[in-house]
Image: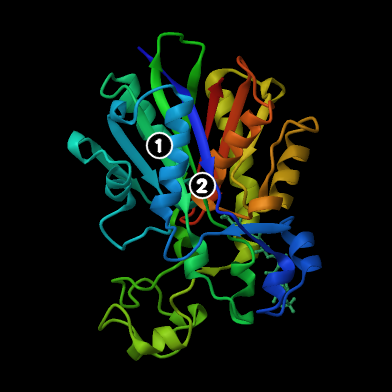
Amino acid sequence: MMNTKIAGIGYYVPKRVVTNDELAQHMDTSDEWIQERTGIKERRYAEKHKETTTTMAAHASLRAIEDACINKEDIDFIVFATISPDYYFPGCGVLLQRELGLTDATIGSLDVRNQCSGFIYGLSVADKFIKTGTYKNILLIGAEMHSMGLDFSTRGRGVSVIFGDGAGAVILQPTEDENKGVLTTHLHSDGTYAEELSLISPGCHGGYHDDDMGKYGFVDPEVLGEILVTETMLKDGLLYPYMNGKLVFKNAVVRFSEVIHEALAATGLQKEDIDMLIPHQANLRISQFLQKTLKLEEGKVFNNIQKYGNTTAASIPIALCEAHQEGKIKSGDLVCLAAFGSGFTWGSTLIRW
Ligand code: UT7
């Protein structure tokens, strides 16, 4: 059977740099708090009206296409992971197809909604399509425009300081070299804590999943159940993401570690064999914890959350691309990607570069 290799890679981040000090002008926060708790120094925000999740994805895609030395017409399938789509529906896959001028091709496009793990979920699906000979040039993207949907008042500070915008893309192709490419992928989820990192409205839940909607700010039961969006939802800021940061953090450190060990066990490799670990950029403290517990040498864990914040589905492909461009990933290296996030969902993969 064929293996799946990453034949091309590209990323795009918007020009506008937003510092912690700039956020502190809008909400009660500080550069010191944000850096100490998250490691983030700055993030990028897209230019409203001119940029969207899809347009950023298109920039990243064209770079990946060029890097793979193919024509965009060679793409035979699109997999698009995001939690900040341009539209509620249709998904960004078809919008990207149109943006790239590929509508003549009537190729398929799949939208992935697995939050921070979206890129790894997408990679796992694409890997199977390549391995079974279904497609030969899959464009896989993770892209986010969080800045459009954050609460920039003090009410939203626990969430809004973390997120940033950007996009990363890879071209996946078959290779006959069985020692190269995606060696293994592992996906998990547990819906027990679905609401603990979520954006539940607008949605069709009508309060069904939890008797105590008060903790998400829904103090008035009348607000729920009748209509998708109400004026009260707008007024009370219920259309913004909610996160129980401490609970997410505690689960993240356990699941990241578990799923990395699972990938190593499946391939008979040891943690010492990892040349570069690229964790989803959720919090610098999570990455540092992983480096310590896995006993990985300095320089074997790649972090760029300091510059871009948490870009959810885009964080792994952006980091992978930067690490590669900085010469930190060489041919033959063992690269481990791992993610954890809302759902909860988590996953890992090992790639022989
Ligand atoms: O990407 C998907 C996965 N996501 C994650 O893995 C995120 C995991 N969680 C985290 O990264 C951390 O929990 C956060 C960075 C979100 C928060 O850090 P924390 O150390 O867990 O802080 P906390 O939420 O427990 O809040 C501590 C204090 C609170 O004040 P009191 O109650 O102690 O008076 C918060 O109100 O810090 C306050 N606080 C802030 N203060 C200044 C919360 N956000 C801010 C802020 N600026 N931006």
The answer to whether 113 appears left or right of 160 in the picture is: left
| The image quarter in which residue 233 lies | bottom left
Dot placed on the residue nearer the N-terminal end, 1 or 2: 1
Can you say which quadrant of the picture contains the C terminus? top right
Q: Describe the colour scheme in one phrase.
A: rainbow
How packed mark 1 is, by other alpha carbons closer than 10 Å (few <14, some 14-19, many 20 or more), is many
Q: Image point 47% across, 41% down: which residue? A: 60
Residue flagged by tag 2: what amino acid is it?
A: Ala
Where is residue 41 shown, x and y percent of the image?
A: 73, 58
Where is residue 289 shown, x and y percent of the image?
A: 74, 45
| The image quarter in which residue 273 lies | top right
Label 2 CB sits under 8 Å from any ligand 1 atom: no
Q: Which residue is mark 1?
A: 140
Q: Image point 44% across, 68% down: which residue? A: 199
How packed mark 2 is, by other alpha carbons closer than 10 Å (few <14, some 14-19, many 20 or more), is many
Look at the image and tell me whether residue 189 can be seen.
no
Q: Which residue is mark 2?
A: 314
Where is residue 231 shown, x and y percent of the image?
A: 36, 88
| The image quarter in which residue 275 lies | top right
Q: Image point 68% across, 51% down: which residue? A: 307
Q: Are marks 1 and 2 in contact (CB under 8 Å)?
A: no
Where is residue 32 shown, x and y percent of the image?
A: 81, 66
Q: Is residue 225 above or below residue 46?
A: below
Circle 1: element type = strand
Q: CA distance from mark 1 to mark 2?
A: 11 Å
Q: Report the front residue among 204 and 55.
A: 55
Q: Image point 69% across, 27% down: which residue? A: 328
